[in-house]
Image (spheres, rainbow, N blue to C red):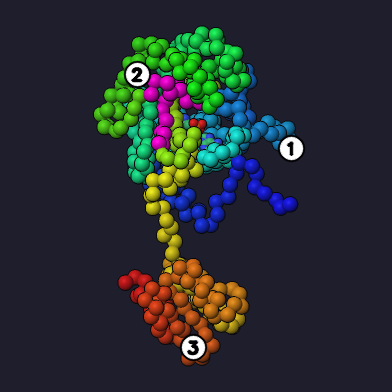
Amino acid sequence: MGINKVKGTYDVLPNESHKWIMLEKKIRDILSLYHMREMRTPMMEYSNVFHRDSEGSDMVTKETYDFVDRSNRALTLRPEGTAGVIRAYVENKLYASQELEKVFYIGPNFRYERPQKGRYRQFYQFGVEAIGTVDPALDAEIVILAYDFITRLGLKGVKVRVNTLGDEASRSAYQEALVKHFTPHKDELCSDCKVRIDKNPLRILDCKIDHKHQAVIDAPTPLDLLNETSKAYFDEVIRYLDAAGISYEIAPKLVRGLDYYSHTVFEIEADIEGFGAQNVLGGGGRYQNLVKELGGPDLGGIGFAFGMERLLMAIEASDIDFSSDLALDCFVITMTKDLRKIATKLLYDLRAQDFVADMNYTDKAFKGQFKQALRLGAKYIVILGEEEAKKGVASIKDTKTEVQEEVKLEDIILYLKHKLES
Ligand code: HAM
């Protein structure tokens, strides 16, 4: 038996990696327009960044990879980006120098979930966090950014759905209303939801098993229990979204899966055929207690994260051209080992001139090498044969026009430069 990849992980093969690179480039280009800087935090954190038993609830998700290192420290592979970013924000006292810190991040996360299309155990997220300021205009800016991002990518059939959970008081009132609503139906709910009634009833609304149950369909919405301040806050957010003129819809039942949200929550859904249940490309919301819980001052933040595998699936489904522009300018064919030394120097000089160049390293016959050059899509093939070398020349073939010319060895760079640039 061979050794296989870990269940729920995948390899990005060389013929696919350009899509990832393109997506990451787009992210960086678009995010810089929003004056956001990149932040990189470790993939592992002490477990209490994500789990805090004292509060009887998991801040992020239960589905984590937890382990003990050789010194008996409890560590966790990050299941998402936010908690680590906030940990770093607090630890480095970033709040002391900026009243608003706007950052983005790209990187792998780990969740022990049941793998299926669009859901993995190691997956990439691109996310943003704006920490330090509480203002409806900032909530709107983050939703607008998510909208702008998917629009610029050119994704089709995508919707932005927005809701509010209200402040702490409204959220608690809502949770109580849910407990009251679901308790008579406890026996009919799935085993997870039975526990959720006491622990975090909001998550029942997100349940993949019970979502068609009548009690879930008839459940009260956060909007039913908003106090005046929370309602005013949400109304302002909506006014800012309208001012920007982006398209969104209010989704009264939207609560999002993570525990740390209050006020604005939102998600980006792709209504794309063949997408199945994993049609949520990303989501986020405001968090008011996370900074404090991780040992910092009483400051709120808001952010979102997109799943990059799902973004790439949506990009493909929307027929967006993400093809590679890494073309091979020149492939050098050599007929003997000695000639390969000339080729080595030639490659070095070509690359010094910023040409993408490669050669053959085996003793394959001319025909095999030629085929290889064509398969790799080389624009020009430089043929170093014995006869040619004696004359101090090489043959250069333009693979498009099929025209072949003899060029002096010392003129090859100039010749290719002229051809490739014209
Ligand atoms: P989340 O909703 O847990 O939010 O994850 C965001 C996105 O990550 C999901 O919508 C999905 O596209 C992707 N995702 C999550 N789990 C998986 C998985 N197992 N496989 C593939 N993709 C997955 C967060 O993580 C929050 N930190 C977002 C946030 C940032 N809220 C505030 N700031």
Disc 3, ligand 1: is the CB inside 8 Å? Answer: no
Q: Is residue 274 visible?
A: yes
Name the residue tied to disc 1.
70
Mark 3 or mark 2, which is nearer the start of the sequence?
2
Residue 388 badge: 3
Q: How many badges with numbers are in the image?
A: 3
Was residue 338 drawn as part of the magenta stretch in this picture?
Answer: no
Q: Is residue 99 visible?
A: no
Q: Identify which amino acid the numbered label 1 is placed on.
A: Arg
| Local crowd size for mark 1, using a 10 Å CA cut-off: few (<14), some (14–19), many (≥20) | few
Residue bounds of the magenta highlight: 251-271
Question: Dividing the picture into quarters, in which one does residue 95 lie?
Answer: top left
- Residue 244 or 163: which is nearer the viewer? 163
Q: Please state the horizontal and vertical placement of residue 264, each as a whole percent of the image.
A: 40, 23
Q: For the residues carrying marks 1 and 2, which lies nearer the camera in this image?
A: 2
- Which residue is found at the position 34% from the left and 27% from the top? 249
Q: Identify which amino acid the numbered label 3 is placed on.
A: Glu
Label 1 secondary element: loop
Q: Please state the horizontal and vertical placement of residue 121, each as a whole percent of the image.
A: 59, 38
Going by the image, does 207 lie left or right of 247? Answer: right
Name the residue tied to disc 2.
233
- Measure the C-alpha gap from mark 2 to mark 3: 78 Å
